[in-house]
Amino acid sequence: MEKKLIIAIDGYSSCGKSTFARAIAKELDYIFIDSGAMYRAVTLYCIRRGFVGKGILNTEGIINELNDIHIEFVYNPDILECETYLNSENVEREIRGVEVTSHVSRISQIAEVRARMVELQRQIGVFKGIVMDGRDIGTVVFPDADLKIFMTASVDIRAKRRFDELINKGLEVNFEEVRKNIIVRDITDENRDISPLRKADDAIVLDNSRMTVEEQMIWVRQIIEKKMYGS
Ligand code: DC
């Protein structure tokens, strides 16, 4: 029988991790989990409760209410994809906005938040046949993942991709702000004390600065085949 894999995709912000992970999951008929969406949903909850904002970070309040935060991925047959739900509300669009994006790094530095998210992510992973993207999937969530990919691309290319994505979604954004946010998130993600962004020793690096998604798929197909069937 064909072996079901756990595929971990980590890397910098706006590298196209989710697009790539989603494409792999579609091709293999696996479950795709966007772990960043989980941190974003927690951040949205915190914004609404006033726990985070400009100059505000009420860590105790967040920790006290962690058990009230329920995150699910619900399949939407109209778009053939899963969407993120926070306490039964579809928040897929709101969690991608500038406000959540500007606070999410601080929320994802809180040890208790990370512990809760990792627990949920591992529960999803027990089924195997899963592609999960994030920052610590290959290092912390699934250190024994069958395949680990670490993605990177230049800051300018990532900023352009993110800017285009937000514009296409009809959001009003400024290119320099998007670029600055990416740089700040890189620094925060790489330097936080708990589970900082780093390449797992056994991860394969993919710099997709000059690659289309189809080219990335051609690259990854051979690697997956080797993992599934040997060579
Ligand atoms: O992948 P993304 O940009 O949607 O992630 C949003 C934020 O969540 C990002 O700034 C870092 C954090 N994150 C994390 O700390 N660990 C993960 N596994 C995924 C995301």
Image (cartoon, grey):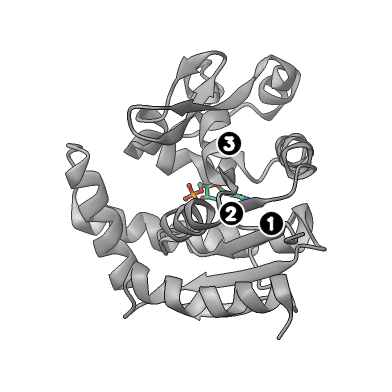
* Label 2 CB-ligand 1 distance < 8 A: yes
Q: Which residue is mark 3?
A: 38
Among the 4 quarters of the image, the one containing residue 162: bottom left
In the image, taking residue 197 as reference, residue 153 lies left or right, namely left
- Circle 1 crowding by C-alpha within 10 Å: few under 14, some 14–19, many from 20: many
Q: Determine whether 199 is above or below 61 in the image.
A: below
Left or right side of 171 for 229? right
- The answer to whether residue 5 shows anywhere in this view is yes
Q: Which residue type carries mark 3? A: Met
Tag 1 near tag 2, CB within 8 Å = yes
Q: Amino acid at mark 1?
A: Ile
Helix or strand or loop: what does disc 2 sit on?
strand
At 64% across and 19% down in the image, what residue appears? Answer: 69
Q: Could you give the CA–CA distance between mark 2 and mark 3, rounded to whole angstroms?
A: 10 Å
Instruction: Give me the residue at 51% from left, 59% from top.
Output: 24
Q: CA distance from mark 1 to mark 2?
A: 6 Å
**With respect to residue 128, does 71 lie above or below?**
above
Q: Is mark 3 within 8 Å of ligand 1?
A: yes
Q: Nearer the viewer, residue 75 or 136?
A: 75
Q: Position of residue 137 (x, y in %)?
A: 69, 56
Q: Residues within 10 Å of mark 3 (few under 14, many from 20)?
A: many
Q: Is residue 33 left or right of residue 163?
A: right
**Residue annotated with mark 2:** 134
Residue 112 pos. (x, y %): 77, 35
Element type at mark 3: helix
Quarter assignment of residue 15: bottom left
Q: Which residue is mark 1?
A: 137
Asked if one can make out residue 153 in the rendered structure from this viewpoint, the answer is no
Is residue 38 or residue 78 the one in the foreground?
Answer: 78
Image location of residue 5, percent across then percent down:
71, 59
